Image (tube, rainbow, N blue to C red):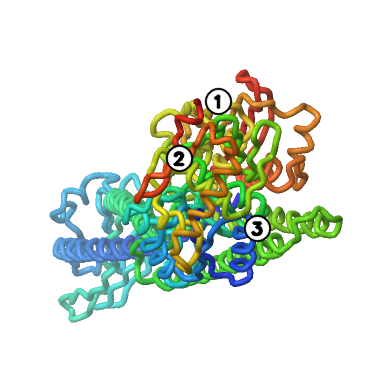
Amino acid sequence: MSIRGNQKKTLSLRLRLVALVVLLLAVSLGLVGFALDAAFHKSSEAGLKARMESLVYLVLAATDANEDGSITVDDDPGDPRLGQPGSGIYAHVYGDLNEWASPSSLTVDLPRSQRAMAGESQFNVPSSENDFYRLCYGVRFELRDRSTLPVTVCILVHSVELQPELLAFRTGLWRSLGVVGLILVLAQLVLLTLGLKPLRRITQDISAVESGELERLEDNYPKELEPLKRNLNHLLDTEKANQTRYRNALDSLAHSLKTPLSVIRSSLPADSSRKSAAIENSVVDMQHLIATRLQRAAASARRSIGKAVDIKTQVERLIQSLDRVYSQKTINTDVIIEPGLAFYGEQRDLLELAGNLLDNACKYGDGRVRLTVHATDSDDARAGISLQVEDNGPGIAEDEREILLKRGVRGDERAEGHGLGLAIVLEIVSAYNGEIIIEQSDLGGACISVLLKTR
Amino acid sequence: MRILLVEDDIGLQTSLSEILREAGYAVDVTGDGIEGLFFGEEYPIDLAIIDLGLPGMPGMDLIRKLRELERQFPILILTARSEWQDKVEGLESGADDYLTKPFHPEELKARVAALLRRSAGHAQPLIELGSLKIDLSSQRVHDGDQEVELTTYEYKVFEYLLMHPDEVVTKTVLSEHIYEEDVDHDSNVIEVFVGRLRRKIDPQGVINPIETLRGRGYRLNKQSQTA
């Protein structure tokens, strides 16, 4: 649940950043595009204007003023496009009496132009009314009678003339901007992946701490994450110190209660009076509570998913110890464990569980004990183990099994019997979310199967 | 049989030594691990009861040291730690049995008797010697159906000899294992005990299980068990 939440959060952080960057890139690249486009437009217009100015001079040179105040323009002023109908470049010359249009304008309906004052030049860009760039230049021709003739030379260029150039530029511009944008977005993705990597790592490490694979955050993180690491480690340390204190307090309480109980027990008169029997029973009850509740509470406070515990080694230690304790009894113990089988829990718990079960089997069995351990999931060694202890003793009657499996209910032997051992086993089984089953063994006695989950 | 009790809790020390003395054992008591090591090293101890949480020297170290010094007498661990991890560690350090607090005094006596028996090579608490039946756990001796009444000291002498069959046991050794302190090494007292014991267990002088070896001591002949 929490893991999915984490992933969602990282994803949204990433998405948000990517979306913002894409938006920013679109706006800024768009603006750059428009600015470049406008600048290019302007410079090509300037180029056009310069070209048109030279055409004005060309046409002017081909213009002559007659004595009668009319004008004559050479039909071929020197630019072939002026002589080619519909070429897109046109010239108009306005005199007082007549006007001249270049042969190129024969098939074209040109807008009329305002006359320009002498020495004045007007430049117009295409508007909604016409599609032409127009440069008009006013001059005065001096006639022989010293009078002057105002003449306006206009060059008109159809706006289509600039289009291919602009189009080519625009296509190139937007294409390269698009490529730049794409590269930037991809770079951003890479940067995000690289930049967020430490965050992902710390998230993984935190969940490793949660699952007990790591004790604290030891890795080196970027400077910005160091305070986070420091604070988390501090929290973990405090937590651990508290746990240790709590555990030690419970532990020493459990153990220090036992000596006074021993004193009470051994100071009781050996007679079997009701009074001493009552005290004796209470002492046994207290002992039972300490062994099951208090000590298990201390044990559960230390729970963390630890390193692999080699089951065979630990079981062999137990069997050697039991052989020593039961040396007056010959006990044959068959151990069936795959070599290398590991328990991913507390070694103490494994010893306690197997120790109690084997102890009962030695005590109540008639010299034959069988211990079988295997992994619950052959594909996942960490999933847990199933452990079975059998003996050839009298076994446990069916109606007794249920009673024994109820927490805190003892068997007939109050302190030392199946009851106490099983009560401790039950505490461990429940701490590992496990299961316990009592059956009849083919050896003849009890068969107790326990399943422990370590994931 | 001489028992070393190393227990630092004064209350438990007192009541345990009382119980053990009542059961007919000679008891050396200390509350300190280092002193315990001294006793174990210097005294002819037959069995040690050692608490694990001791001042001076932890019980586990004491056991290890005693075993390093090749003291082979049985050791019973007495501890509040009842978890198997602790039991296994204790037994691995060289102890022979383990008793967790709080325990029933009868349980302690039974364990002590069993350990002593085991170390003498007797698997069962019942020993037969000719027509005599000796129950080591109830400390009673029967001749056929008839109970043989022995005093504490007579029984102690008999028990020690039973635990060391076919061995020559000097009077000094006997007195060392029967008395806690070297109160009086007057060998006459031992001679008196042995004489009385002989008369009681073998009034007709038929099996003569206890042989006197002049100038050396006594020997309990196991052969006479089958004879």
Q: Residue at x 50, y 64 (%)?
A: B180
Question: Three-letter amino acid code at disc 1?
Answer: Arg
Label 3: which residue?
B102
- Subunit under mark 1: A
Q: Which mark is residue A279?
A: none
x, y (%) of residue B43?
Answer: 40, 62
The answer to whether residue A234 of the structure is visible from this angle is yes
Label 1: which residue?
A368
- A416 or B138, nearer to the observer: B138
x, y (%) of residue A394?
Answer: 69, 26
The answer to whether residue A126 of the structure is visible from this angle is no
Q: Nearer the viewer, mark 2 or mark 1?
A: 2
Label 1 crowd bin: few (<14), some (14–19), many (20+), radius 10 Å: many
Label 3 crowd bin: few (<14), some (14–19), many (20+), radius 10 Å: many
Kindly report the distance in space between the C-alpha atoms of the residues bearing marks 3 and 2. 38 Å
Asked if residue B161 lies left or right of residue B109, the reply is: left
Q: Is residue A143 above or below residue B195?
A: below
Q: Residue at x 52, y 43 (%)?
A: A350
Kindly report the distance in space between the C-alpha atoms of the residues bearing marks 2 and 1. 37 Å
- Subunit under mark 2: B
Q: Residue at x 31, y 71 (%)?
A: A122
Q: Are marks 3 and 2 in contact (CB under 8 Å)?
A: no
Question: Which quarter of the picture shows residue A22?
Answer: bottom left
Question: Three-letter amino acid code at disc 3?
Answer: Pro
x, y (%) of residue A170?
Answer: 32, 53
Label 2 crowd bin: few (<14), some (14–19), many (20+), radius 10 Å: many
Asked if residue B101 lies left or right of residue A214, the reply is: right
Could you say whether the residue bearing mark 1 is in a helix, strand or loop?
strand
Q: Residue at x 63, y 48 (%)?
A: B150
- Subunit under mark 3: B
- Earlier residue among tags 3 and 2: 3
